[in-house]
Image: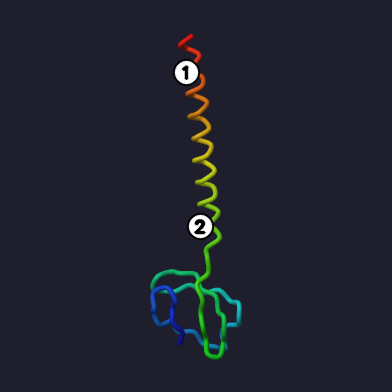
Amino acid sequence: MATCPECDADIEVDEFDVDKGDLISCPDCGANLEVTSTSPVELEAVEDDDDEEDEDDDLEEEEEDADDTEDEETEGGDWDE
């Protein structure tokens, strides 16, 4: 038995079924967890790489949108002349 570090739920994990470094998900909260010890079984939360990539993509899109807005403002200045 191990405990989820995110939600403190009890997770039934047999130390003979997992190895150090294995990844599992908490059945209660869905957190991605890494096995850091097998005797006793200990788990540590793992950052989700997909979420980080999505955040990076969102940031890039926001920067592109800001650049587009600046270009439109500059083009609008030409109409005044």
Whole-angstrom CA distance, mark 2 to mark 1, is: 37 Å
The residue that label 2 is drawn on is 51
Residue 62 versus residue 50 in the image, above or below: above
| Badge 2 vs badge 1, beta-carbon distance below 8 Å | no
Callout 2: SS: helix
Is 20 placed left or right of 12 in the picture? right
Is 39 placed left or right of 6 in the picture? right
Q: Position of residue 55 (x, y in %)?
A: 50, 52
**Earlier residue among tags 2 and 1:** 2
Task: Determine crowd level at label 1: few under 14, some 14-19, many 20+ residues with C-alpha closer than 10 A.
Answer: few
Residue 55 versus residue 12 in the image, above or below: above
> Label 2 is placed on what type of residue?
Asp
Task: Give the residue at x 45% y 69%.
Answer: 31
User: How many badges with numbers are in the image?
Assistant: 2
Task: Give the residue at x 47% y 18%.
Answer: 76
Task: Give the residue at x 56% y 60%.
Answer: 49
Q: Nearer the viewer, mark 2 or mark 1?
A: 1
- Of all residues shown, which one is farthest toward the top? 81
The residue that label 1 is drawn on is 76
Q: Position of residue 22 (x, y in %)?
A: 58, 76
